[in-house]
Structure formats: structure tokens, C-alpha cells
């Protein structure tokens, strides 16, 4: 499964991605997790299984959510508290719940 995190420049989520990868290892899960800029949304939509938006770009919801829904890709805004404290396990759980709800 490929989880894509999008933020303004793809940098502020990098630390969170590393924490999510560690949480995935701890849970013995095979996932690919990457951070990218919102400018690459259309490209990431093609290969992602789940897309999570950083809270700072929630203003893009009205643009991105309809596109993701049309492509049948689960999308959500990262829980602000989990994002703020860098809780990779909780954000990983959020992504997995989106996949479960989409099945």
C-alpha cells in the first residue's frame, strides 16, 4: 500500500513520514509512505492508495477531494493534534482506517 502525505512544499511532513515508517515496522506492516508538495497532487493521485493532506493545506479540500473521489482514492486531512505532536502511529492508523472504509 502506498500512502502519500501532501503539504505546502513536501518538507513539513518529512519527519512525520519517518515516524509513520517506524510505526509501520513496529506493526510489521509493509507500506510505502512518501511526502510531496501539493503541486504534485494529480501525479500522486495516479499511484497513491491513500492521500492525506497536511492541516496547513486544508484549504485545498474543495479542489482535491472531488478529484480523489472520482478516482476512487481515499483522502482526508491529517488529524491536527496527531500532526502537531508528530504521532506517526496515529496518522498511520488514520490512513489504514481510510483504506478499511473504502473497501
Image (spheres, rainbow, N blue to C red):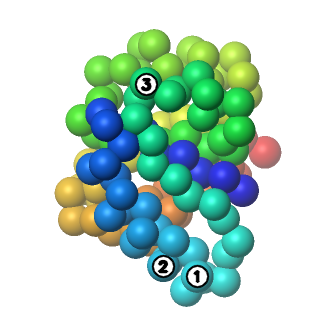
Per the image, the residue denoted by label 1 is 25
Q: Position of residue 34 (x, y in %)?
A: 52, 53
Per the image, the residue denoted by label 2 is 22
Residue at (21% x, 57% y) in the render: 84
The Cα atoms of the two marked residues, 1 and 2, are separated by 5 Å
Which badge, 1 or 3, is on the more N-terminal residue? 1
Q: Confirm whether residue 90 shows in the render.
A: no
* Residue 72 position (above or below residue 88): above
Q: Residue furthest left?
A: 84
Residue at (71% x, 38% y) in the render: 47
Q: Quadrant of the C terminus?
A: top right
Q: Nearer the viewer, residue 57 or 94?
A: 57
Query: Are discs 1 and 2 less than 8 Å apart at CB?
Result: yes
Q: Give the secondary structure at mark 3.
A: helix
* Residue 22 position (above or below residue 9): below
Q: Quadrant of the N terminus?
A: bottom right
The reply, left or right, for residue 91 in relation to residue 9 is right
The reply, left or right, for residue 72 in relation to residue 41 is right
* Residue 31 position (above or below residue 94): below
**Marking on residue 37:** none
Q: Quadrant of residue 42?
A: top right
Q: Give the secondary structure at mark 1.
A: helix
The Cα atoms of the two marked residues, 3 and 2, are separated by 27 Å
Amino acid at each position: 500500500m502506498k500512502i502519500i502525505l501532501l503539504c505546502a512544499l513536501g518538507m513539513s511532513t518529512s519527519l512525520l513520514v519517518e515516524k509513520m515508517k517506524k510505526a509501520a515496522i513496529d506493526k510489521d506492516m509493509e507500506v510505502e509512505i512518501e511526502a510531496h508538495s501539493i503541486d504534485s497532487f494529480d501525479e500522486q493521485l495516479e499511484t497513491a492508495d491513500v492521500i492525506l493532506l497536511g492541516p496547513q493545506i486544508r484549504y485545498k479540500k474543495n479542489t482535491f477531494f472531488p478529484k480523489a473521489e472520482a478516482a476512487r482514492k481515499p483522502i482526508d486531512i491529517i488529524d491536527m493534534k496527531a500532526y502537531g505532536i508528530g504521532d506517526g502511529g496515529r496518522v498511520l492508523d488514520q490512513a489504514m482506517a481510510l483504506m478499511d472504509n473504502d473497501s
